Every structure is written in C-alpha cells, then in structure tokens.
Image: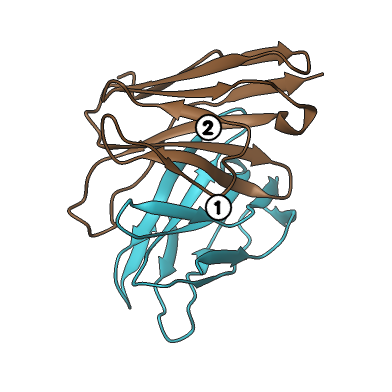
Amino acid sequence: GNSVTQMEGPVTLSEEAFLTINCTYTATGYPSLFWYVQYPGEGLQLLLKATKADDKGSNKGFEATYRKETTSFHLEKGSVQVSDSAVYFCALSVGAGNQFYFGTGTSLTVIP
Amino acid sequence: NAGVTQTPKFRVLKTGQSMTLLCAQDMNHEYMYWYRQDPGMGLRLIHYSVGEGTTAKGEVPDGYNVSRLKKQNFLLGLESAAPSQTSVYFCASSPWSGGANTGELFFGEGSRLTVL
C-alpha cells in the first residue's frame, strides 16, 4: 500500500540550529513527494515538492531530496528561526485521482 | 484571492444531529477532497472527487456522505453525528495534472466540529 512515516515530535530547537525531520515512504506506483507546513490555527500550505528521483525541492531555506533508493524525503534547514515554529507534514501523491497520503506530522518549536 | 473557503468554521452538535460542511473553491480545480485531522494521526482522507458529479471513498468514509453537484463546491454531510466525529475537517482542492500526480493541494482554513 501507500504510506508515509515521519519522525515523531515534538522537536524543540534553539534559533539558528540545524533542522532535520526524517520522512520515509512506501508507494505502489511512482509517487510525487511533498512537505506541507501548518501554522497555528491555519490550514496546510505547500512548503516544497519533488516529482522524480534525485530532484531537490527547496523553499524559504528548507530543502529535501527525493531518494528513491532509500525511499526517503528528509526535510532540512541550516538555520531555523522562531517564525519556523509550526507542524510539518510529509506527504506523497500517487494514483489516478491524485490521492495524497500524509504522515502524522512533526511539531517544531524554535526558541530564541 | 479567496482560494478554498469552508463554512462553518466552528460547530457544536449533539449526538444524532445532522449537519453539512460546505467547501467552495474559485480556482477551477478538478479535484476536491475532505480530510479530518486528529491528534497523533495526521490527516486522513474521508472522500474525494475527481470532477463534477463524481465522488469516491477515501480512507475513513464511514458516517459521512458527500456531493459534488457543481465543480466549485464539495459538500460533506454527517447524517447522525457521533462523538467519534469530533475533529478538525479540512477541505482541499487540486488542479488536474494530466495523470502526473504533481498537482499540489490547496487547503481551506479548517472547520472545528465538536459532537457532545
């Protein structure tokens, strides 16, 4: 089947620390991979995506590389800010109906 | 820029009552989805639609019904609400991507439902 497993939180970091949130997946076809971010009280919004193996998605200093050999799509940022505090969801899209499968989310808190 | 709009934002129901959540999108997207978000479980797909007049079951469809009579609207109904349906509900839409599965989801702000 299709599923996404991501590192459990919550994660607490000091400002300017390095961030890694692990994400691995299983898929029946060739998926596209996404990271979504949810700020408090809001809906999810796309952070970055990659649609084929070895592609690197990047946005706002975050990046993730589609690794087909390890079925992974880990999220990284070199220096986090307080404004990055949010819940991060890894997701994959596969199938004719563009069906998305989400991980359980990782809560990140960045302290000054 | 309205995007995806959900109504109502908050609702409290008693067990056994019925209600409908409305989702409207103004981006002419083909696909629409209803998810529920529960602590520790992420987002789970309830129902989805690949076009006007079509609906399909997702991961957790029991206790819910949907309709897509107009392309821009996707309604989620609870015929007889249960406490287990207390959750935050998100509607999302996505453009057709030619079968490439690359279209991103655009989410509404969520509807918080409490069933007593």
Q: Amino acid at mark 2?
A: Phe
* Chain containing mark 2: B
At horizontal 24% and vertical 28% (from top left) the residue drawn is B27
Tell me if residue A65 can be seen.
yes
In the rendered picture, chain B carries what hue? Answer: brown
Is B114 placed left or right of B97 in the picture?
A: right
- How packed is label 2: few (under 14 Cα within 10 Å), some, or many (20 or more)? many
The colour scheme applied to this rendered structure is by chain
In the rendered picture, chain A carries what hue? Answer: cyan
Same chain letter for marks 1 and 2: no
* In this view, A73 is above or below A89: below
- Viewer-proximal residue, A104 or A75? A104
* Chain containing mark 1: A
Frontmost of labels 1 and 2 is 2
At horizontal 74% and vertical 21% (from top left) the residue drawn is B114
Residue A10 occupies which quadrant of the picture?
bottom right
Task: Give the labeled residue for mark 2.
Answer: B90
The picture places residue B79, in percent across and down from the top left corner, at: 61, 20
- Viewer-proximal residue, A107 or A3? A3
| Distance Cα–Cα, label 1 vs label 2 | 14 Å
Task: Give the labeled residue for mark 1.
Answer: A89
The picture places residue B37, in percent across and down from the top left corner, at: 63, 39
The residue tagged with tag 1: helix, strand or loop?
strand
